[in-house]
Structures are given as structure tokens and as C-alpha cells.
């Protein structure tokens, strides 16, 4: 015995809403990033130029960790 197609309509709507939500989030990221693709990882420049929050609060510049011997 088959399943009436009316029983599958809610599942179709749910799947469609996942697609609409994904497309909306992608568009929001795209336009929020001035038309460039969203980045998934920070590169070396972003990692070295990011200051810890404690340094911004107290304006202390030696908050950067040392790189070890032979900087």
C-alpha cells in the first residue's frame, strides 16, 4: 500500500525551508563582506595582527607572546 502524496508535503516544505535559509545566510554573508566570498580560516596576517582582549582593555603593548629564543 502506497503513501498518499499529501503526507509528504510537510517534508517537502521543511526541506525547501532549509534550502531557503541556507541561501539567505549565504547571501547575508556575501553582502556583509562587501561582495566577497566568506572566509573560513584566518591567514597569518590576521592571526598576528589580532590583539588579545586584555591588551585592548588596559592599553598594554607587551601582551604579545614571545616566540622563543632567536626571535
Image (cartoon, rainbow, N blue to C red):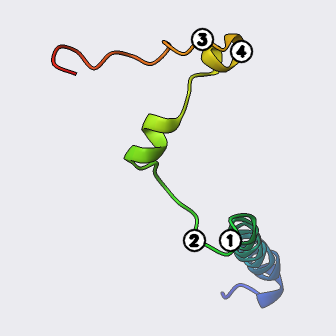
Q: Are marks 2 and 1 in contact (CB under 8 Å)?
A: yes
Q: Residue at x 45, y 19 (%)?
A: 64
The image shows residue 13 at horizontal and vertical percentages of: 80, 78
The image shows residue 41 at horizontal and vertical percentages of: 46, 51
Rounded to the nearest angstrom, the CA distance separating label 1 from label 4 is 31 Å
Label 2: few (<14), some (14–19) or many (≥20) C-alpha neighbours in 10 Å: few
Q: Residue at x 64, y 21 (%)?
A: 53
Residue receiving disc 3: 60
Rounded to the nearest angstrom, the CA distance separating label 3 from label 1 is 35 Å
* Residue 71 position (above or below residue 31): above
Residue receiving disc 4: 57
**Residue 31's image quarter?**
bottom right
Is residue 40 shown left or right of residue 26? left
Rounded to the nearest angstrom, the CA distance separating label 3 from label 2 is 35 Å
Nearest the eye: 24 or 58: 58
Q: Nearer the viewer, mark 3 or mark 1?
A: 3
**Residue 47's image quarter?**
top left
Residue receiving disc 1: 30
Q: Residue at x 75, y 80 (%)?
A: 12
Amino acid at each position: 500500500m502506497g503513501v498518499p502524496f499529501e503526507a509528504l508535503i510537510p517534508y517537502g516544505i521543511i526541506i525547501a525551508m532549509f534550502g531557503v535559509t541556507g541561501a539567505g545566510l549565504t547571501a547575508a554573508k556575501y553582502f556583509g563582506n562587501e561582495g566577497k566570498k566568506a572566509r573560513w580560516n584566518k591567514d597569518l596576517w590576521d592571526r598576528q595582527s589580532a590583539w588579545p582582549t586584555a591588551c585592548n582593555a588596559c592599553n598594554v603593548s607587551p601582551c604579545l607572546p614571545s616566540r622563543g629564543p632567536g626571535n
